Amino acid sequence: MKRKYIHKAFIALSLPLFLLGGFASCTEADSDLVSFTENNTLDTPNDTVYSVLGIVNKLQKIADRTILLGELRGDLTALTEHANLDLQAIANFTADASNPYNNARDYYAIIQNCNYFLANADTNLVKQGRRVFEKEYAVVKTYRAWTYLQLAINYGSVPFYTEPLLAEKDAQPSRFPFYTVEQIADYFVNDLAPYVDVDFPSYGAVGEHNSSRFYLPVRVVLGDLCLWAGRYREAAKFYHDFLTKQGSIHPTYANTIAWDSFEFTDILDGYASQFSANNSETLSLIPMETREYDGIVSRLTDVFNSTAENNYYYQATHSAAYDELSRSQQYTLVYSDPVTLLPDTVYASDTIHYENDLQRGDLRLYSIYKLRSQPTANASQSALRQTCQKYRTSGNDRFLSYVCLYRVQHVYLRYAEALNRAGFPQSAFAVLKYGLWKDNIEKYISETERNEAGELISFNQYTFLRENTLGTHSRGSGNANADSTYAIPPFASKTDSILYVEDRICDEMALETAAEGQRFPDLMRLAMHRNDPTFLAAKVAARRGTANVDASLYARLSDKKNWYLPLE
């Protein structure tokens, strides 16, 4: 069969000849060279397995940048003087076409692979009454939707097409309409909705990971698309139905870091342990190589941690804005009085002496970022060494074996965001403070709001229980449900209540997902909800602290067009 090779900067495709022993792809040319066989119908199980896993391989190229573009442009991370120039340009919004993190072609390589699969998979093939490739088809459609969403988040308005490009003349950007994030979201809601109940394929273990975590939950991606499109009630429904799906429920569980007594002397940390590929908290990941010999490795550990490779000079750490937010949280502790045996509520005061200032307020920052002194460091090494628990490696491994895209808590926080914007601020706040299980729903959400929200806040009373359902704020701020200061004040209008709760959701997103690449997209989306670019600008400009606001950065980001990377 005739073979074509097309060199172009706009798009790159290499049909995957995938090696299951690692996550390496065999191609006949470099990443700028398109290679495919004409009339190549995907009509055997091996074809589709290799193609789907080949798309996973393509996702490896954008794994680190998904985290770094989302995190460094936000307000929660500060770069150190040892950060490389490419990272500094991202954080300063000065990245140009030469920046390795600014390469739209890598996203289009994924999209082209997806388009090719969707155009050529034999969807009519039926065995034992089931369409053979239905599961893979749903997976690939979801990859494509998610990748387009990332493109639009990072570039603002992007060339849009859904058919494979088979000739050089087809690959001219001028041939395609440019879609905004809202247009992309609207398109893919309709495109993905028919596959909402299709199960994932099962390939078992691939490398050290369960392959089921390579896939993006369709309902969660649909929720994200609706959220970006401003279709709030639909978004809340998709998130709710994902969390409560019979046979595959996702309670919050109780991964917390907490003071173990009213004396505030000892801490019990069950929080950082959830950041592993095999924890039930992890929903979706991109598997990465653990040896450069095998292919693409993640460099996130060298950015957020002290490693031998960076001479222990970490490049990114928590910002002053994050420190201020964490310290400002009221830690609340409920304990049984030893004399009366009655429950008593204690608020951590500012007069408590803490061994580490990161222990003040919410404890999640303290759990995630660890700094230690190494007095034996030599002259070329840093004596101050940081570990970010979200990017720690296992054993003696140098590289992370995966990059996490979705956690259960991401879904709960976006569910709260959607509920709030759909007009249900009490329900949204209950996600943060109490946890949505039967008694709390009836106690803390008015009858009027319960009736209006209906099935959006319906949780099975036999599976969502006090023991496995926790308000997100209690993961680091103690017994938030007992904190009388953490409440919705009386407002004259529901609009004011919605804005207030949205501010609390924004803070909770910071406390819960810092360093995970969620922050800048979250700020973008909230600013879009409000039709107010200065909401994002004010947050990012104050990353060095409220007493050190960057006025020039505020002015630049007050213009929405400056949020995006140049598409070149």
Image (cartoon, rainbow, N blue to C red):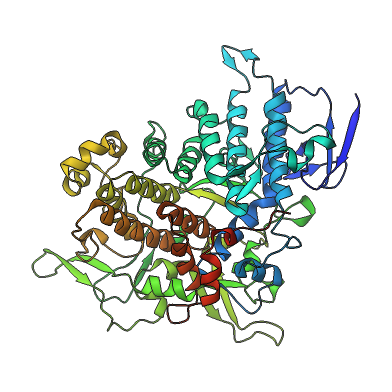
What is the count of numbered marks? 0
Q: Nearer the viewer, residue 99 or 359?
A: 99
Residue in view at x 83 percent, y 33 percent: 167
Q: Is residue 218 visible?
A: yes
**Residue 392 x %, y %:** 57, 63
Q: If the image is split into quadrants, where does the N terminus sit?
A: top right
Q: Is residue 203 visible?
A: no
**Residue 195 x %, y %:** 52, 27
Relative to 244, is 190 on the left or the right?
Answer: right
Q: Nearer the viewer, residue 557 or 78?
A: 557
In the picture, residue 207 is in which quadrant? top right
Relative to 218, is 9 on the left or the right?
Answer: right
Quick check: 233 above or below 30?
A: above
Relative to 8, is 370 on the left or the right?
Answer: left
Quick check: 72 above or below 108?
A: below
Relative to 318, is 79 on the left or the right?
Answer: right
Q: Residue furthest right?
A: 2
Quick check: 445 above or below 68?
A: above
Q: If the image is split into quadrants, where does the C terminus sit?
A: bottom right
Q: Nearer the viewer, residue 172 or 134?
A: 172
**Residue 464 x %, y %:** 29, 41
Residue in view at x 29 percent, y 82 percent: 352
**Residue 490 x %, y %:** 18, 59
Q: Nearer the viewer, residue 262 or 476?
A: 476
Residue in view at x 26 percent, y 74 percent: 348
Q: Residue furthest left?
A: 340
